[in-house]
Amino acid sequence: MKIKNILVALDLSELDVTLIKYCSMLAKNHETENVYFIHNVKKYEISNLFSEQLENISIEDIIEEELDNSINKHFDADCNYELLVSDDAYTESLISYVANKYHADLIILGNKNTYKGSGSVSGKLLRMAKCNILSIPKEANLNPENLMIATDFSSASLKAFNTASSINKKKEQPTLKVLNVFKIPQLFFPYIKIDKAREKVEKHVSLQFEKLLNKTKASNVETIKASAGDDSIPEKIRAIAEKDKTDILFVADKGHNNFTSLLVGSVTEELFTQDLHIPLWVVKHYIAS
């Protein structure tokens, strides 16, 4: 899979080095032509107490020099790159605008729910951005091998499967796992015994897995089905993915069926706003080679 244009959101936090290195790895593996590093300076957050001291100082120039040094040190992919420093009140709007302007296939940003930088990006970006989004924690594996897709068997989650499969083809010993977490609606309980209900749902999920694999003609894929039980669906997905030491978790931006839901604003957004210890790749569309 070719990822032609990548946008990387930097925020002067300790995550920046990880993001730069991760982007470099992807760019080298996926024929990237252009990388755009962006930082948003929120001047209104600078206290008026320091306005006199900063009167003759260009904050943008200082930040640009610091980021440029970090990029030169940690980015070694053979492609074009550009550093963009802006001053905008709304970071999500800025990232979305720049991504559209430069036809970005992928936005890379840090999971800032644990590590604080000079800016943070909320789940609002999930609804605004038109391209794929990859959220990366500080401890991300820079040589991802163990890939997992959370699916609800919708057409949207099929895009996530195809994306993960394309990434997986670059690996010598591919490991691709497809996870479905189901939750039995409470309204079934008074009328159907829980064991029988679970058995029926598991058979349905197994059939859906079979259809998915036949449709995609995928091989060397491990299927995993699990009941959410008392947990929420995103809690269960996270627990399974982290226990399995997943290197990248792929989810669709939306999707729905009778037993699971991956709608923006629900499962995907909850995963996106958690302090996940693994990269989360939100697939808006499949990037055709």
Image (cartoon, helix red, strand yellow):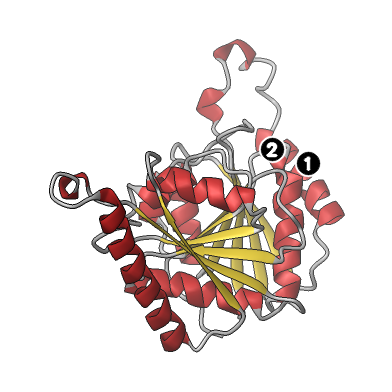
Q: Position of residue 12 (x, y in %)?
A: 69, 37
Please tell me whether mark 2 sits on a helix, a strand or a loop. Answer: loop
Quadrant for the C terminus in the image = bottom right
Q: Residue furthest left?
A: 191
Q: Are marks 2 and 1 in contact (CB under 8 Å)?
A: yes
Q: Residue at x 50, y 77 (%)?
A: 162
Q: Which residue is mark 1?
A: 66
Q: Residue at x 67, y 64 (%)?
A: 146
Question: Which residue is nearer to you in this view: 230 or 83?
Answer: 230
- Quick check: 98 above or below 265? below
Q: In the rendered view, does 76 fall on the left or right side of 284?
A: right
Q: In the rendered view, does 198 fall on the left or right side of 8?
A: left
Q: Position of residue 91 (x, y in %)?
A: 48, 42
Comparing marks 2 and 1, which lies closer to the viewer? 2
Q: In the rendered view, does 167 fall on the left or right side of 17?
A: left
Question: Which residue is nearer to you in this view: 52 or 162?
Answer: 162
Quadrant for the N terminus in the image = bottom right
Question: Which residue is nearer to you in this view: 94 or 165?
Answer: 165
What amino acid is found at the position of numbered circle 1 in the picture? Glu
User: Can I make out residue 109 in this image?
Assistant: no
Q: Which residue is mark 2?
A: 12
Q: Is disc 2 surrounded by few (<14), some (14 to 19) or many (20+) residues within 10 Å?
A: some
Q: Residue at x 50, y 58 (%)?
A: 98
- Quick check: 29 above or below 141? below
